[in-house]
Image (tube, grey):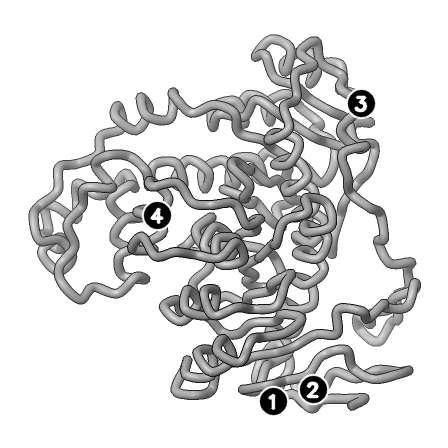
Amino acid sequence: MKEMELKYGCNPNQKPARVFMKQGELPIRVLNGRPGYINLLDALNGWQLVRELKKATGLPAATSFKHVSPAGAAVGLPLTETLEKVYFTGGAELSPLACAYVRARGADRMSSFGDWISLSDVCDASTARTIQHEVSDGILAPGYTDEALQILKQKRKGGYNIVAIDEDYVPAPVETKEVFGVTFEQGRNEVEINADMLTNIVTQRKDLPEDAKRDLLITLITLKYTQSNSVCYAEGGQTIGVGAGQQSRIHCTRLAGNKADIWHLRAHPKVLSLEFVDGLSRPDKDNAIDVYISEDYDDVLADGVWQRTFKIRPDVLTAEEKKEFLAGITGVSLGSDAFFPFSDNIQRAYKSGVRYIAETGGSVRDDLVIAEADRLGITMAFTGCRLFHH
């Protein structure tokens, strides 16, 4: 098949819409549903991300995309007991690929609501059963087991979007896009992100353990497919906060850092002990947790809204308790898609437990940024590679 007609483009008024190949056949096959324009943008960006994650780490990978940026990305490491509770897995036995998706989805569950999933490997039944319980628009993978396909076809009353991609497909080395009738052309960003990028350590502290290297690679590969400016925090084989599309880098760092803080606070004992009313959906639980962690929860308690969500009125998670809990977080990795122009980024990252950084380098203020990393005891590598994505 050389082309596929779509219902509409980014918005319902944008018609006609299609995807097509100038040469050769489309590398994708729709096995179920009717994916849209944005769905396929998410799918193809997500496929590139997970394919590169697997190549860099040797582990199966998954990503959860929303509006052409990843809400989360991860590799298939086993879940801890705490993460099983945080991610609502119910203690189910999960395949490595299922673990990768649970982690990717769990990175930012609020943003992942209605996501597009991309997987590096053939979707197995374990992964399909995990996806079955999430609100999602569709999935792309190099293949599906028969059992997985049948499970996924039951989602959304039989209309769930299921797409297979030819994993041997290689795109042309030059890509084009049109804006306002003007055609842009550039070479594809084929830079390979690997451990060699992390060898130019510019700080006094040189310590860079293997798990930090893995997490830094995850941040950089994620940033390669995130709308710029972008900053990414990672821990334990997954992203925990992505700040995308901000005009100021410090705003990227703050946005991603706030998401990382929320991710950590979901493991606070008070959050883990919340008792939800019977039958409450996962999205409603996610919303309730987000409100509970937020600063305005006192108002919710005062209004009595908690009764719709919780069996027992929960104690407030105070600002002091949150600060104390987050102060114990360390070992987080951070990547930036370009250089940090000011040291305030380093200061903000440190507050969210960052101790390892990979950034481009090349700012006129590199010396000030390095000095701040040295003051805080952070290991920082200059990659020499900018990863803007638009």
Given contact means CB atoms under 8 Å apart, are the residues at marks 2 and 1 in contact? yes
User: In the drawing, does residue 3 fall left or right of residue 117?
Assistant: right
Residues packed near mark 3 inside 10 Å, few (<14), some (14 to 19) or many (20 plus): some
Q: CA distance from mark 2 to mark 4?
A: 41 Å
Q: Quadrant of residue 169?
A: bottom right
Q: Position of residue 334 (x, y in %)?
A: 60, 33
Q: CA distance from mark 2 to mark 1?
A: 7 Å
Residues packed near mark 4 inside 10 Å, few (<14), some (14 to 19) or many (20 plus): some
Q: Position of residue 360 (x, y in %)?
A: 77, 32
Q: Quadrant of residue 88?
A: bottom left
Given contact means CB atoms under 8 Å apart, are the residues at marks 3 and 4 in contact? no
Q: Which mark is residue 7?
A: 1
Instruction: From the image, tell me which residue sits under label 2.
Output: 17
Task: Look at 31% across and 21% down and name the residue there.
Answer: 324
* Amino acid type for the residue under numbered disc 2: Ala
Q: CA distance from mark 3 to mark 2?
A: 46 Å
User: In the drawing, does residue 185 fall left or right of residue 252?
Assistant: right
User: In the drawing, does residue 312 fall left or right of residue 76?
Assistant: left
Instruction: From the image, tell me which residue sits under label 3.
Output: 200
Regarding residue 348, the answer to whether it shows in the image is no
Q: Secondary structure at mark 1?
A: loop
Q: Earlier in the sequence, mark 3 or mark 1?
A: 1
Regarding residue 289, the answer to whether it shows in the image is yes
Task: Look at 34% across and 36% down and name the residue there.
Answer: 265
Q: Earlier in the sequence, mark 2 or mark 4?
A: 2
* Amino acid type for the residue under numbered disc 1: Lys
Q: CA distance from mark 3 to mark 1?
A: 48 Å
The foreground one among 176 and 101 is: 101
* Amino acid type for the residue under numbered disc 4: Glu
